Amino acid sequence: MTISSSLNASVAGLAANASRLATISDNIANASTYGYKRAETDFHSLVINNIEGTYSAGGVRTTATRLIDQSGSLLSTGNSTDLAVRGRGMLPVTTETSIAVDNGENPLLLSTTGSFRPDESGYLRSSSGLVLMGWPAEADGTVGVYPRDAIDGLTPVQINTNQFAGEPTTQMDLAVNLPATSTDTGAEGNPETLSIEYFDNLGKSANLLVEFQPRVPPATPENTWDLTITDSASGGATVGEYTISFADSRTAGGTLSNVTDGATGDPYDPVTGSFSVEVDGGPIEINIGVYGSSTGITQLSDAFAPVAINKNGTPVGSLTSIEVDANGYVRASFDTGVNRVLYQVPLVDVPNVNGLETLDQQTYRVTPSSGTFFLWDAGDGPTGDIVAFAREESTTDVAGELTELIQTQRAYSSNAKVIQTVDEMLQETTNIKR
C-alpha cells in the first residue's frame, strides 16, 4: 500500500510539473506580446488519513492562475490611438464579427491595451479584430447620461475620416478706442466704421458692419456716440442700435458711463457688459465692457483704433487627427483649429480582476467569480487613466521564467527517479518468491 502510494504520488508529481512547464512555456512564448498577463501554477499537497505507524503519500495537485492584476511597463509608440490603461480598469472592446452581423448585440470584452486604427468603415479596430467602444457625444461635444452597470449606450467608436466640421460664431469681445476729438465742438462728425467677420451655422463667412456716429455739440449729452450694427447675411439689415456715452472725470475719463438701448438688439446688460444681436443664423453676444472699464470700448485721444476683437467660431475644416485624452475623450482635430469630442471611452472595473475569464487576443470576460462590472470615467474613482501613444508590454520576466524552468526540470527528474526506485523495489519484492 505504501509503495503503491509512493508510485501514485510521483505520477501526480510528474503531471503537476508538466502543468507548471506548460504555464512557463506559455509565458516565455508571450514575452513580447503586448498586454499579456503571465500565468502561474500553484502546487497543493493532497493529504490522506494515515493509520498510526504507516504513511501513505497523497501526492500533489495544481491550480493555474492568470495574474491579470499585474501591470506591464508602458512603451511609447507613434500612433495616437495606441492606448494603454495606467492603473486599475480596462478598455471596453468588442469583436468585429459582432459588428458585421449588425444585430445590435455587441459582446463586452475587456482589454488593458490595444493598437486601434480606423478600418474601411471608420471603426477603431486592432489588427486582431477588436473594436474599441465608447459613449457617443452630442453635436456640442457633451456626453449624455448613460447607465454605469450595463452596456446600454456603449457603441463601437466610428470615425469618418472624410468628415468636415465648423463652429458658428456666438460670442464676440469688442475693444475699440474712439477719438475723443470727434465729439468736440466744431468737429466734422465723421463716422467710424469697422467690419467684423463671423461664421454662420453652415460655416459660411458673413460680416457685421459696426458704425460709430459721434454726436457733435450742441448735441447732448456730451461724449456720446450712436452705435449701429448691420448684418451682411441679412441683406444689410440693422440688427443693433445703441447710444453709448463716456465719462470725462479725472478717475474714469474715457470709459463707458451709459448705454441706451435702441429699436433693435437685445438690451445691454451692465453686469456682463454685453448685448445680443440677432443675425441670420441666430444670436451673437457682443461684449463691449462694463461701466468704468478700460478693457472694452473707450473714448480717448484723437485716434480710432480697434484694440482687440476676439470671437469664437471657425469656417468648415477637414479632419487632420484623432486623439484620446487621459479621461477617455476621443477628440477630432480639424485644420481650422477646431477640436471636437466625438466619444467618451469609459474604464471597466470589477471587484476581482483575477476572476475574469481569459480569452484570445489578451481579452477578458466578466464571470461570477470576477463580480459585476461598473463603468467609470477614466481617472475617476478607483480607476487609472488612459495613456495614448502607448502600449502595455508583457508582464513576463524571462529571467525568472528560465529559473523556474530549471527548477521544474529538476523536480520532474526527481519524480521520475522516485518512480524508477519504486519499480526497483517492486522488482525486489517479486524476487522474494524465487
Image (cartoon, helix red, strand yellow):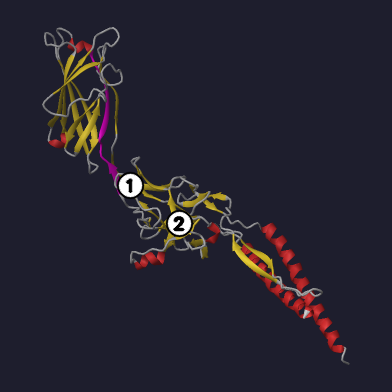
- The image shows residue 293 at horizontal and vertical percentages of 29, 18
As drawn, is 107 to the left or to the right of 425? Answer: left
Q: What amino acid is found at the position of numbered circle 1 in the picture? A: Ser
Q: CA distance from mark 1 to mark 2?
A: 38 Å
- In the foreground, 228 or 141: 141
- In the foreground, 182 or 88: 88
Is residue 343 rendered magenta in the image?
no
- The image shows residue 267 at horizontal and vertical percentages of 17, 26
As drawn, is 274 to the left or to the right of 80? Answer: left
Write down the region rendered in magenta. 164-179
Q: Would you identify the image quadrant in which residue 194 lies?
A: top left
Q: Say which residue label 1 marks.
A: 318
- The image shows residue 295 at horizontal and vertical percentages of 31, 20
Please name the predominant secondary structure of the magenta segment in the image: strand
Residue 127 seen in the figure:
yes
Q: What amino acid is found at the position of numbered circle 2 in the picture? A: Phe
